Structure formats: C-alpha cells, structure tokens
C-alpha cells in the first residue's frame, strides 16, 4: 500500500474520525488549516488511490457535492505501512519515554485483556 503524505494523512484523519460521509467542504470546516484547492486535489488523489470512495451525492447549499467514506481503516493503514518490528520498537519507545501514568495503565489493561483471551482459548 502507498504511504500517505502528511497532508493526505491529515485529510484521512478527518475521514477516519467521522461517522458520516464528508464532502471536501466538510473537511475544510472540520480542519480549516487546509485550503479548499489542497483538499479538493488531495481528495481526488485519495479517491484514485482507493483510500476513499464516493458514498453519496447530495446538495451542499445549492450545489451538488460528492461525499466520501474511507475504504481502509486507520488501523489497517498503519499496519500495512509499518512492519510489526517497527511497531514493536515504537511501543517500547513510547513506554520508555512517557510520563503519562493513565496511558500506561490503559496499555496494561489492554495487554492483560489480550493475555486473558489467550489463556481462556488455550492458545500460547
């Protein structure tokens, strides 16, 4: 899978964080740090590269506008772009450098829950 540029990733974050289809105008309303031309150009590129799909065509005011949904989840994207060995290094670095006890407790709970699932299913 193609690795996204920083701007493409910024746009995809908006789509991943939305539960409804969004138009390019909606993306700009959610993240006004980007220009309309940039968003429209990158949405077309993301559509061509199968990161987005057209969900609907609706009126936005008096103009018809396409609304898009992501074709790939954020989790699927990051797992496809970064090898597991790099993800493990990132996790270890995060644990070693964070000063946020709540983040560490959340990680601990998730790990313990996963281990419990392995134990209850008999997997090692």
Image (cartoon, grey):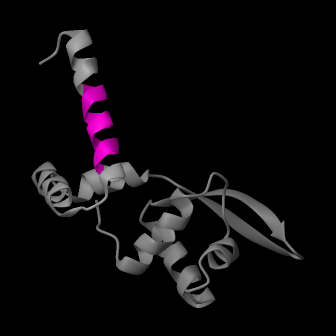
Q: Is residue 113 above or below residue 52?
A: above
Identify the residue at horizontal 62%, vertical 83% (top origin): 32
Based on the displayed image, in which of its 4 quarters is residue 94 positioned? bottom left
Question: Between 115 and 8, which is closer to the camera in this rendering?
Answer: 115
* Quadrant for the N terminus in the image: bottom left
Could you tell me residue 74's position as x and y percent?
41, 54
What main secondary structure does the magenta stretch of the protein show?
Answer: helix
* Quadrant for the C terminus in the image: top left
Horizontal side of residue 51 vs 31, given as left or right: left
Question: Between 96 and 32, which is closer to the camera in this rendering?
Answer: 96
Give yes or no for residue 107 being in the magenta stretch. yes
Give yes or no for residue 101 being in the magenta stretch. no
Identify the residue at horizontal 70%, vertical 66% (top origin): 66
Could you tell me residue 14's position as x and y percent?
54, 66
Could you tell me residue 18's position as x and y percent?
60, 57
Magenta-highlighted residues? 104-114
Identify the residue at horizontal 31%, vertical 35% (top origin): 110
């Amino acid at each position: 899978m193609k690795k996204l540029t920083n701007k493409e990733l910024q746009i995809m974050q908006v789509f991943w964080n939305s539960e409804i289809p969004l138009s390019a105008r909606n993306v700009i309303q959610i993240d006004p740090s980007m220009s309309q031309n940039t968003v429209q150009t990158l949405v077309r590129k993301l559509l061509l590269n199968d990161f987005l799909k057209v969900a609907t065509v609706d009126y936005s005011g008096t103009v018809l506008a396409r609304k898009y949904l992501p074709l790939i989840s954020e989790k699927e994207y990051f797992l496809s772009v970064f090898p597991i060995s790099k993800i493990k290094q990132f996790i270890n670095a995060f644990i070693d450098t964070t000063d946020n006890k709540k983040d560490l407790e959340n990680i601990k709970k998730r790990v313990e829950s996963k281990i419990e699932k392995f134990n209850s299913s008999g997997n090692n």
